[in-house]
């Protein structure tokens, strides 16, 4: 199973090709401009590759690029919210150069998100908008309308998703009676392993205001957690933020902007490999040894891949609170997608965490498909995937790792943001977890976003975090 939905592969491939071209041109210009010799260039290229690969990784979860042909799908209710039994109508406009497109066939389908459509049809565009009767849902959930147009050999797509009483969506994943005992025992085992923190200054990344370090710490099972740390250089004590990663295998760089504002920032990888390697190493691992890592040992709750990952996030907090520059109280965690899940999980497992901020969390209510509705990433039970995972042993493991069972444990304030059009982390799955949270929570809902966020969402999240951490 790919980490990236098939429908997104073409756009991401295009973005990656542009990344390679731009990186190559950038390096060539600098070599000519500054007359860098061959030996220097080898070292320089390695550094630039890490930076550009990190930037490309951000692009995958950032705002999607504009399309030449715009397929605009709009529900007939401004808030995109409906009551069960209420009909949803979807208005569709197809624009080329911001003018209505004519004489091209548009295909559309409507149905519950991620499931087989209940309605499929097509029509030839006449330059006018048209309305699709989406029908309704009889119970809480989401109804999605997808419209596609093939123009000059390329496929363009637009969608809108109507929400039906999302605040009433309930979890499908059961809660084990020994859930807390299981994780308390695991944390106790972790506490007996020495931290063995190793910090190496990275002079080329340091600034006048911030020191940057490569870090390794000992984790559960005597594996390691690697990350990059940024510490303000001025005298004093500072709040700290743990950055937990989205799905995949890649390198990372610390958040320098927050560090320059007076916040210790620590970004970690989850796979027990350094986070400053050549991008090709990560690509080889993603395509080889770590391919579909989220399924490793899923049939054994004590050996499942994410056990070491979840405990590694707690261990990262062990490291942060051990720093002499830490203020002793203000500790936050943040991330998107898999990182959104890890933010919730870390906050639930570790009472030292005081705030969390999560974008479109994954790993929520993954068994939804077995109950006839969408489940969360990594879509273990979607269509053909179910034949590999719908077994007693795996179904017994999942409840110990699904976000829904951590969400109910939260006791701290949290900031959350997502949209209704997310096909990677369906809103049904995210609401199944969100509705269980009883601690203070703020949801910034931007309906039309998919598995990406507008700059305003990132800005609001960071403003919320810095305010909570006492930074102005």
Image: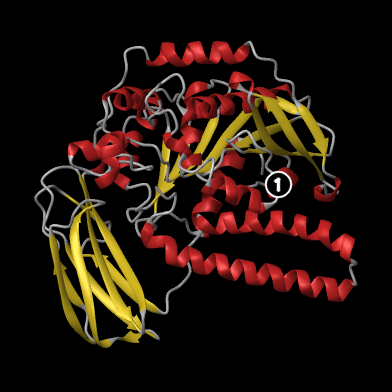
Q: Position of residue 422 (x, y in %)?
A: 36, 53
User: Which residue is at 90% across, 67% downward?
Assistant: 37
> Camera-side residue: 239 or 316?
316
- Left or right: residue 78 versus residue 259 is left
Q: Is residue 328 visible?
A: no
Instruction: In the rendered view, tell whether residue 121 sits above or below residue 323.
Output: below
> Camera-side residue: 456 or 343?
343
> Camera-side residue: 29 or 208?
29
Instruction: In the rendered view, tell whether residue 79 sits above or below residue 470.
Output: below
- Left or right: residue 391 versus residue 362 is left
Q: Position of residue 182 (x, y in %)?
A: 43, 14
Q: Position of residue 326 (x, y in %)?
A: 73, 27
User: Which residue is at 18% across, 42% downward?
Assistant: 140
Quadrant housing residue 23? bottom right
- Which quarter of the figure is the C terminus placed in? top right
- Left or right: residue 262 versus residue 130 is right
Q: Residues within 10 Å of mark 1 (few under 14, many from 20)?
A: some
Circle 1 residue: 277
User: Which residue is at 35% across, 27% downward?
Assistant: 398
Q: Residue furthest front?
A: 288
| SS assignment at label 1 | loop
User: Which residue is at 45% across, 56% downward?
Assistant: 452
> Camera-side residue: 319 or 45?
45
Q: Position of residue 454 (x, y in %)?
A: 48, 59
């Amino acid at each position: 199973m790919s980490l990236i939905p098939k429908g997104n592969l073409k756009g991401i491939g295009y973005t990656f090709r542009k990344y390679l071209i731009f990186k190559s041109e950038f390096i060539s210009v600098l070599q000519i401009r500054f007359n860098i010799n061959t030996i220097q260039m080898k070292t320089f290229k390695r550094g630039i590759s890490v930076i550009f690969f990190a930037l490309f990784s951000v692009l995958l979860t950032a705002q999607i690029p504009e399309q030449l042909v715009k397929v605009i799908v709009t529900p007939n209710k401004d808030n995109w919210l409906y009551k069960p039994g209420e009909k949803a109508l979807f208005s569709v406009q197809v624009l080329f150069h911001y003018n209505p497109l004519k004489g091209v066939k548009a295909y559309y389908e409507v149905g519950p998100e991620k499931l087989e459509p209940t309605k499929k049809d097509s029509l030839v565009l006449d330059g006018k908008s048209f309305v699709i009767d989406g029908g309704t849902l009889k119970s809480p959930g989401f109804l999605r309308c997808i419209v596609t147009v093939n123009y000059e050999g390329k496929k363009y797509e637009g969608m809108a998703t109507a929400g039906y009483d999302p605040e009433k969506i309930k979890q499908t994943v059961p809660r084990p009676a020994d859930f807390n005992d299981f994780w308390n025992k695991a944390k106790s085992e972790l506490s007996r392993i020495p931290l063995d923190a190793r910090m190496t200054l990275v002079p080329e990344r340091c600034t006048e205001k911030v020191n940057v370090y490569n870090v390794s710490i000992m984790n559960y099972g005597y594996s390691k957690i690697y990350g990059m740390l940024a510490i303000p250089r001025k005298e004093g004590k500072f709040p700290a933020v743990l950055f937990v990663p989205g799905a995949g295998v890649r390198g990372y760089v610390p958040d320098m902007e927050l560090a320059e504002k007076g916040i210790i920032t620590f970004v970690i990888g989850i796979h027990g490999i350094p986070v400053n390697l050549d991008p090709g190493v990560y690509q080889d691992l993603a395509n080889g040894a770590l391919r579909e890592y989220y399924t490793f040992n899923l049939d054994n709750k004590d050996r499942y891949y994410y056990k070491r990952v979840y405990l590694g996030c707690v261990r990262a907090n062990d490291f942060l609170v051990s720093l002499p520059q830490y203020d002793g109280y203000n500790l936050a965690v943040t991330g998107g997608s898999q990182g959104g899940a890890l933010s919730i999980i870390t906050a639930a497992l570790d009472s030292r965490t005081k705030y969390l901020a999560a974008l479109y969390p994954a790993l929520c209510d993954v068994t939804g498909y077995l109950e006839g509705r969408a489940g969360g990433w990594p879509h273990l039970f979607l269509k053909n995937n179910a034949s590999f995972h719908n077994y007693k042993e795996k179904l017994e493991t999942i409840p110990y790792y699904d976000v829904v069972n951590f969400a109910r444990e939260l006791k701290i304030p949290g900031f959350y943001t997502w949209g209704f059009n997310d096909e990677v982390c369906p809103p049904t799955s995210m609401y199944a977890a969100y509705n269980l949270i009883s601690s203070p929570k703020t949801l910034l809902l931007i309906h039309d976003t998919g598995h990406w966020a507008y700059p305003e969402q990132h800005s609001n999240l960071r403003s919320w975090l810095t305010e909570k951490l006492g930074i102005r």
